[in-house]
Amino acid sequence: MIKLFFDLDGTTGGQDKNVKSVLNELINIIPELSLLNPNDAYFQFKSINGKLWSHIKNYGYSVKHLHKRRFLLWMNFFYR
């Protein structure tokens, strides 16, 4: 069992580089992700993250909501 904790919400410097690095690591260590194109994975993650941040700003959702949903939505995009 792999437990993974990461915060990729755009609040730290060098965030884009960190996102790419973490997603590449995930693609390399989780067999189910091994067929993903790293660029597609990155752009989809950024899209989901941006939409969730918009929901926080526009609808008053908490950052905790973003943290709970972001990775699940990303995985669901590729494995529906």
Image (tube, rainbow, N blue to C red):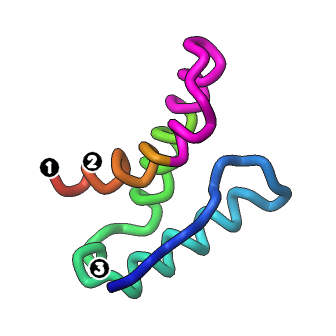
Judged from this view, the residue extending furthest toward the left is 80
Per the image, the residue denoted by label 1 is: 80
Q: Which mark is residue 64?
A: none
Query: What is the chief secondary structure element of the magenta stretch?
Result: helix
Sequence-first disc among 3 and 2: 3
Write the residue at 60% across / 12% down.
58
Q: Is residue 48 above or below residue 75?
A: above
Three-letter amino acid code at the position of disc 3: Ser
Q: Is residue 78 above or below residue 28?
A: above
Name the element at disc 1: loop
Instruction: Specify start and end residues of the magenta stretch as a single range.
Output: 51-67
The span from disc 3 to disc 1 (Cα, nearest Å) is 16 Å
The span from disc 2 to disc 1 (Cα, nearest Å) is 6 Å
Q: Is residue 47 left or right of residue 77?
A: right
Write the residue at 51% across / 36% down.
65
Q: Which mark is residue 34?
A: 3
Residue 61 % position (x, y): 56, 24
Check residue 58 for magenta coloring.
Answer: yes
Q: Is residue 6 above or below residue 80?
A: below
Name the element at disc 3: loop
Determine whether label 2 and label 1 are within 8 Å by CB: yes
Per the image, the residue denoted by label 2 is: 77
Write the residue at 56% across / 72% down.
22
Judged from this view, the residue extending furthest toward the top is 58
Three-letter amino acid code at the position of disc 2: Phe
Q: Is residue 5 left or right of residue 36?
A: right
Residue 75 % position (x, y): 31, 56
Three-letter amino acid code at the position of disc 1: Arg
Sequence-first disc among 3 and 1: 3
Query: Around disc 1, counting alpha carbons within 10 Å, would you say few (fewer than 14), some (14 to 19), or many (20 or more)?
Result: few
